[in-house]
Each structure stands twice: as C-alpha cells, then as structure tokens.
C-alpha cells in the first residue's frame, strides 16, 4: 500500500510523517505517471493559486478529475477539490467535492487559530485540535456531501463525498491521524 502526496509546495512532509508513523509508505506525486503508483492521494495545505498553476503545468488536471481512489485535501487542497471558490483568484476547481468555499475567510496569517474540532466518522464522534492557517470557509454544502467535522458552534470544517475528504484545517500539524487512518481504511483490500 502506498499513499501519494502532491509534492510541489506546502506541508507535504508533515503528511508524510503521519503516514510513516502509521507504517505506510508515501511518494511525492509530481507527474501523472506517479498517480498510477499509489492507492490514495493527499493534496496538502499550501497556496491554492500556486497548486492551480502547477496542476495545469504538469498535466495533472484531467488525471485528478478522473482519479477514483481515496483522496484527502487539507486547506488549499480542499480549495482545489471544491466545485466553486469565492475569491478574486479562484484558481482551479476540480469539482471533486460539491461544496462552495471562500478563500482566506477568517482573515490573514495573523488571524490563524487553533480550535477544538468535532469529528463524525463511521457513526462515532471524536474531538481533535484543528489548526486553521489562512483557512477557507465552507459556505455551501451541496447534494451528496456528508459533514464529517464541525467547530463547537456547528460551523462545517470537514466534508466527505464518496471517497473524497476535504478539511479546512490541518490535522497533520496537530499530529491527529484520524483522517489519515480513515483514508487508508478506504483503500480496498485485494483478496489473495
Ligand atoms: N490561504 C491559502 C489558499 O487560499 C490556504 C492556506 C493553507 O493551505 N493553509 O490557498
């Protein structure tokens, strides 16, 4: 089993560290061919407008639209997975999650914050620490999308549509591996 992490920019190393602690190998994905080598993929946090440029430049746009294995996007990763982005620079929307997101919705870097996040997965509830860095806000949740994480006041900060997960925060920075474990669990096991 191998997990790919889009490896041009952003906090891919923190994601890799979490998978390593779970005993899972990772590779950095930079070319369409790399997608064939992995069973799940992470689009990390970073700068979504930059991701938009590199995804286009390295011909990853169509492969990412067609990718049907488990997929996790955190922060900037969520922004490129969304179906609609509210901003002067919307970048690229891969339309993998039927949500509308607003970039930098809590303000600038200095307005970054940590907050408790309630997680709802597989009928179970957990609480983790969410690290929000120039985070987007999920302003509309469309059909087919489940809410899997909220702030205490109910604000939606995590969604799932089929095997695609999007989070406005960074579980990899607080060291919470609940979503990484869930991503791995979504990889179908091949019977011998
Ligand atoms: N503000 C960034 C963007 O809009 C996202 C920040 C992050 O990934 N932590 O792309």
Image (cartoon, grey):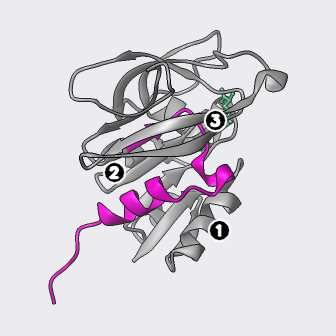
State which mark lies toward you, 2 or 1.
1
Q: Secondary structure at mark 1?
A: helix
Name the residue beneath numbered marker 3.
Answer: 53
As drawn, is 107 to the left or to the right of 189?
right
Q: What numbered label is drawn on residue 17?
A: 1
Is the CB of mark 1 within 8 Å of ligand 1? no
* In this view, 1 is above or below 163: below
Crowd rating for badge 3 (residues with CA inside 10 Å; few <14, some 14–19, many 20+)? few
Q: Label 2, label 1: how many angstroms apart (C-alpha)?
A: 24 Å
Q: Residue 184: name its quadrant.
A: bottom left
| Residue 13 colored in magenta in the image | no
Q: Is residue 158 left or right of residue 31?
A: left
Which residue position holds label 2? Answer: 67
- What percent of the width, then of the height, locates residue 4? 50, 64
Quick check: which quadrant has ligand 1? top right
Query: Does the numbered disc 3 mark a residue whose Cβ is under 8 Å from ligand 1?
Result: no
In the rendered image, residue 178 lying in the magenta stretch gets the answer yes
Ligand 1 closer than 8 Å to the CB at disc 2? no
| Bounds of the magenta segment | 165-192
Q: Tag on residue 41?
A: none
């Amino acid at each position: 089993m191998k997990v790919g992490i889009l490896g041009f920019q952003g906090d891919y190393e923190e994601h890799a560290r979490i998978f390593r602690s779970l005993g899972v190998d990772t590779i950095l994905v930079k070319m369409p061919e790399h997608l064939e080598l992995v069973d799940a993929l992470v689009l990390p946090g970073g700068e979504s407008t930059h991701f938009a440029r590199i995804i286009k430049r390295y011909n990853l746009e169509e492969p990412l639209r067609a990718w049907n294995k488990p997929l996790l996007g955190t922060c900037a990763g969520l922004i490129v997975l969304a179906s609609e982005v509210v901003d002067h620079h919307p970048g690229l929307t891969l339309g993998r999650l039927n949500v509308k997101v607003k970039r930098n919705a809590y303000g600038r870097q200095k307005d970054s914050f940590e907050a408790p996040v309630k997680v709802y997965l597989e009928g179970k509830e957990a609480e983790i620490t969410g690290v929000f860095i120039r985070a987007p806000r999920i302003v509309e949740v469309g059909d087919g999308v489940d809410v899997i994480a909220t702030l205490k006041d109910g604000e939606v900060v995590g969604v799932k549509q089929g095997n695609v997960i999007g989070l406005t925060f960074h579980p990899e920075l607080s060291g919470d591996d609940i979503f990484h474990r869930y991503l791995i669990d979504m990889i179908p096991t091949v019977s011998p």
